[in-house]
Amino acid sequence: MTDKQAGGDVRLSGISKTYGSFTAVHPLDLTVPEGSFFALLGASGCGKTTTLRMIAGLEDPTTGTVRLGDKDVTALPPHKRPVNTVFQSYALFPHLSIYENVAFGLRRRGVKSVKKQVDDMLELVQLGDFAQRKPHQLSGGQQQRVAVARALINHPQVLLLDEPLGALDLKLRRQMQLELKRIQTEVGITFVHVTHDQEEAMTMADTVAVMNGGRVEQLGAPAELYENPRTTFVANFLGTSNLIEAEVVQSSGGEVVVTAGGGKLRLPAGRCPDATTAGGRLLVGVRPEKISLTPVADADAVPAGRNSVTGRILDSSFIGVSTQYVVESPAGKGLEVYAQNVEHRAGLEPGAEVVLHWNPEHTFGLDAAQAIDAGVETVGERP
Amino acid sequence: MTVTQAPPLSPAPGGPPAHKTPVRRRLVPYWLLLPGILWLVVFFVLPLVYQASTSVQTGSLEEGFEVTWHFATYWDALSEYYPQFLRSLLYAGTATALCLLLGYPLAYLIAFKAGRWRNLLLVLVIAPFFTSFLIRTLAWKTILADGGPVVEVLGAVGFLDVTSWLGLTEGSRVLATPLAVVTGLTYNFLPFMILPLYTSLERIDPRLHEAAGDLYARPATTFRKVTLPLSMPGVVSGTLLTFIPASGDYVNAQLLGSTDTRMIGNVIQSQFLRVLDYPTAAALSFILMAIVLVTVTVYIRRAGTEDLV
């Protein structure tokens, strides 16, 4: 067994998993740098949990290798890998006390005096007073912390977290996200976190890999993924994007001009696919919070040089810090606009004719060959 | 845009408190219990009281029996038939241990490894119940018959030499030996061991096995530290369901055994039906009940499964 100082990155090369004729994970190369907080993000069934289980050794890859540092662990059974997992439903041993649950890994490795380590670890997750209780006597959030403690006490080279916060309610989830982030910073162990919650992934992780249909769609820092999605799936799954079908009129001097719904829009060439040429088609995207709304009557006040589209407000929902508008326009049916509630603004009621305008720099272009609604979450999931 | 509606008014303060339910509602559980209780009174408590009184009677069939509080019957019965008592406990205990050894791996396989064959295997476990207990035991008489293929093979591989040396068989015979009786008991009570074991194993979340492996436990350690402790309720109920009826059984000893393998069930049966010494038979029954109760209580205490009792 390797100790933590042996260290190293998690390196997956050409790893794939098929069940009969179903391919859960397509051949995948992925490197998780040592000490990072890495998130695998995707909808259920995208292969993220399978990937995690292959790192843990709970699933044998069909092809490819798993390396921890310089060591090939592909053929090692779970109990021989310096990796620990926090399971989705925690999988605490119901017949053992919290203390014994946490001590389990140490005892299996033949550590004689576990008391100090277990006490310290329970202290770290703030459960010192619960050592002698049984798991069923604890709340969901407390069980979750026991699961983290039980894994972390072994100082694994990598800690794998399989939707660890899925069973908690929203408020507790937010709290535990910060808690996990704090623990990760404190212990400095590589965390690989699987989640379907894009906010969770963005809040906690340094690097996010967005998975879809058994493939990694895009990998990068949360802000990078959010600002520069490369596929419609990423654009829609990470937050919300307004995607507008457009035709390229001109592409020169680092700027692309397109027509959509009768109007012209401009965007930086650097944020478009390489093969963008005049006459081709493009999906033009802009995030809802980047757009400003101005009543048509005040259209003159819109600064020159901004992309603008006219439309009519279909619906508005007041959600405290901001108001979310749905706008119908020739460019797109349900364009979303989030406006900060800085001051009350007249003329923005449903039915009002408005101008939507935004900085061309905030526009991105995507290959028009993709499904425009890939990765759109079902109604009701968005906070 | 919709007009929101005010929530319905909560009950006025000072109204009837919520926990007060009508008398009829509170009596419902008792009404539901009534048929079962009546059944138990008529078919369990009354016969038990009747037997208790029989055990302290004296007399004969011709002159009639009378309650004389003759407790000496108990002592006489015990001192005369203690070898049969010991033999019963020994045979039942051995059969229970064999059932556990055979049943645990099978129940484990059905619960964790059988996949889509699981239901078929469970049906096969229960299948013997479709024929009568007596017929099945008689079938073993044929299987273990002298000179039959089973006995021939056992003799040829030297198995019978070992069992003869242990005193479990005699020469080249299996029938009418302790081995035959224990085999019959094991066979007949095996499903009662497998089913509770299966139920408790099946309830174990397979992720607990994964978690144990993830926490550096080798498969054998996972079994010892996680699977076995979690299946203890099944082990306890399986052994009880096997041991208790096996210790009072007389069919196997009657059909597969000889006069040297008589169990206490056989003694009680013959006292009741042939010797017609009802007080002795009743006393023996109560002694057996007491022994089983004590054994089981000690066992449950030791096994420490609170959620069973």
Image (cartoon, rainbow, N blue to C red):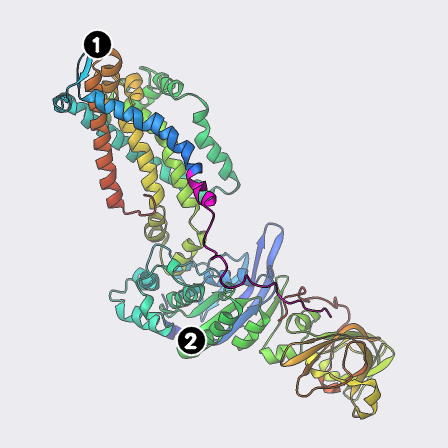
Secondary-structure class at tag 2: helix
Can you tell which quarter of the image residue A182 is in? Answer: bottom left
- Residue B20 within the magenta-colored segment of the rendering: yes
Q: Examine the rendered structure and indicate whether residue B283 appears above or below residue A211.
A: above
Magenta range is B1-30
**Residue B245, image x and y in percent?**
31, 29
Q: Disc 1: which chain?
A: B
Residue A183 got which mark?
2
**Residue A326, image x and y in percent?**
75, 74
Q: Examine the rendered structure and indicate whether residue A334 appears above or below residue B35.
A: below
Q: Residues within 10 Å of mark 1 (few under 14, many from 20)?
A: few
**Residue A254, image x and y in percent?**
76, 87
Does any portion of residue A282 appear in the rendered image? no
User: Which is nearer the eye, B45 or B288?
Assistant: B45
Q: Which residue is mark 1?
A: B61
Can you tell which quarter of the image residue B255 is in? Answer: top left
Residue type at the position of mark 2: Ile
Quarter of the picture holding the N terminus of chain A: bottom left
User: Which is nearer the eye, A367 or B24?
Assistant: B24
Residue type at the position of mark 1: Leu
Q: Examine the rendered structure and indicate whether residue A233 appears above or below residue A365.
A: above
Evaluate if marks 1 and 2 touch, with contact meaning CB atoms under 8 Å apart: no
User: Which is nearer the eye, B16 or A19?
Assistant: B16
